[in-house]
Amino acid sequence: MIRILSVAAIMAVGATLAYAQGAGGAAAIADRKAAMKAVSGANKGLVDMAKGDVPFDAAKAAAGFKTIEDNLAKSKGLFGDDTKTGDTAALPAVWEKKADFQAKMDKAIADAKAAGPASTTEAAFKDQHKSFAANCGGCHKDYREPPKK
């Protein structure tokens, strides 16, 4: 009887762990999508400023780049093997070329970190944003499924 209960307990723990791992992947994808949505939102504000649709404001530029830096850093750790499938736009290349992907994320994080303090004038901001946006686009081209139209 004890042996049967022990086996049943081990099976229950195993099933719980399997379920948690599956849920962990879905949760990580959701967290990753939320972080990337925050990056996109912050970048939209920076794009509007770069285009002149809103006036240049060094403090707002710095805050936008900080939001991007923080959320890229958060999302970088959310590309585990359990997030390869599911509701994600990440391409298989993320996991096939993991070192390159991680290096590009590190560069984007470093660029955003440097861009905020360097954006003291409108001209400096526009240069910083242009450089940052080009790097984001390159990563999306290689590692993100194109948006559906």
Image (cartoon, rainbow, N blue to C red):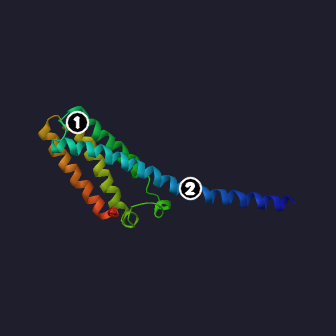
Q: Is residue 73 left or right of residue 16?
A: left
Instruction: Say few, some or many: other residues with alpha carbon within 10 Å of mark 1 (under 14 / 14 to 19 / 20 or more).
Output: some
> Mark 2 = which residue?
23
Along the viewing direction, whichever of 97 and 116 lies nearer the viewer: 116
Q: Earlier in the sequence, mark 2 or mark 1?
A: 2
Residue 142 position in % (x across, y down): 30, 64
Q: How many marks?
A: 2
> Mark 1 = which residue?
117
Residue 34 position in % (x across, y down): 42, 48
Q: Quadrant of residue 121?
A: top left
Depth check, mark 2 against mark 1: the one in front is 2
User: The disc labelled 2 sits on which kind of residue?
Assistant: Ala
The residue under the point 15% across, 45% down is 127
Secondary structure state at the residue bearing disc 2: helix
Q: Quadrant of residue 67?
A: top left
Residue 84 position in % (x across, y down): 46, 63
Secondary structure state at the residue bearing disc 1: helix
The residue under the point 66% across, 56% down is 16
